[in-house]
């Protein structure tokens, strides 16, 4: 078996390990947030930051444009000046939570993406979000790390390989986003 075949085989096993009931629960949370006018916040580091930004884009445009009901979603990863200011002037682990403190309200939905489940800046977000009454959804890998214990709902890719964890996280994000794009009536652009 060549490398590409081996990677594909292991990725399919990773996808098969996902708890789809939890994904369906997350979809329900997103639908409730949209219908109640709640804001959704998403964050992560490195590849997970890219996943957070990509996901927010899919939801802001693909799952909202042309639809009567639109999502309010913000990727805490997207303001580079704000991220670097907090990281430099306060602490990197405060870069997401300090933004969240400006915008989050009880009942909002906070989603954190962390392959290890141990990213301090994502952990701070969940501690704060839980303390003010937000819903918390984590996408984790490996053993879930500390984030799994802070999340009200954890969707875990329980494998050691970071690439396959990140692949699975993007697939979960697409499952959530495309539920709204594929299940709703076609938008009137």
Image (cartoon, grey):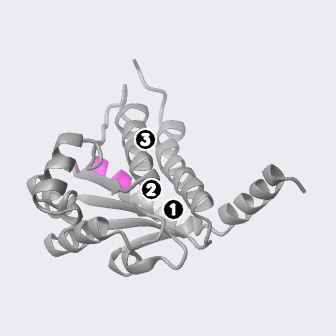
Q: Quadrant of residue 55?
A: top left
Given residues 127 and 45, the one toward you in this image is: 45
Provide residue 76's location: percent of width, then percent of height: 26, 50
Label 1 or label 3, whichever lies nearer to me, is 3
Give the residue at mark 1: 23
CA separation in Å, label 1 and label 2 = 6 Å
Compared with 128, 71 (above or below) is above
> Viewed as shown, does residue 16 lie left or right of 108?
right
Dot 2 or dot 3, earlier in sequence: 2
Q: Residue furthest top?
A: 189
Is there a contact, CB below 8 Å, between mark 1 and mark 2? yes
Q: Earlier in the sequence, mark 1 or mark 3?
A: 1
* SS category of the residue bearing label 2: helix
Per the image, the residue denoted by label 3 is 54
Relative side of 159 to 143, left or right: right
Query: Which of 135/141 is in front?
Result: 141
- State the image coordinates of residue 112 (x, y, percent, origin top left): 36, 62
- What secondary structure do most residues of the magenta stretch adopt? helix
Residue 189: percent from left, percent from top: 39, 18
Q: Position of residue 26 (x, y in %)?
A: 43, 61
Label 1 CA crowd tier, 10 Å (few <14, some 14–19, many 20+): some
Q: Can I make out residue 104 in this image? A: no
Q: Closest to the observer: 123 or 4? A: 4
Secondary structure under the numbered disc 3 in the rendered image: helix
Residue holding disc 2: 27
C-alpha distance separating marks 1 and 3: 18 Å
Q: Mark 2, mark 3: which one is toward the viewer? A: 3
Span colored in magenta: 30-36
**Are the residues tagged 2 and 3 within 8 Å (C-beta)?**
no
Say whether residue 107 is magenta: no
- Up the image or down, 55 lies above or below 142; here it is above
Q: How many marks?
A: 3
């Amino acid at each position: 078996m060549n490398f590409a075949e081996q990677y594909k085989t292991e990725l399919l096993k990773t996808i098969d390990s996902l708890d789809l009931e939890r994904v369906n629960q997350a979809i329900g949370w997103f639908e409730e947030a949209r219908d109640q006018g709640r804001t959704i916040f998403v964050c992560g580091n490195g590849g997970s930051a890219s996943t957070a930004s990509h996901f927010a884009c899919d939801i802001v445009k693909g799952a909202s444009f042309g639809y009567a009901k639109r999502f309010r979603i913000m990727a805490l990863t997207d303001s580079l000046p704000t991220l670097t200011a907090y990281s430099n002037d306060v602490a990197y682990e405060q870069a997401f939570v300090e933004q969240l403190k400006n915008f989050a309200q009880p009942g909002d939905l906070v989603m954190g993406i962390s392959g290890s489940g141990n990213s301090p800046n994502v952990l701070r977000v969940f501690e704060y979000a839980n303390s003010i009454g937000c819903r918390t959804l984590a996408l984790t890998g490996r053993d879930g790390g500390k984030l799994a214990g802070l999340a009200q709902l954890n969707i875990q890719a329980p494998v050691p390989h970071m690439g396959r964890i990140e692949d699975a996280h993007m697939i979960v994000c697409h499952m959530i986003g495309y539920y709204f794009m594929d299940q709703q009536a076609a938008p009137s652009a």
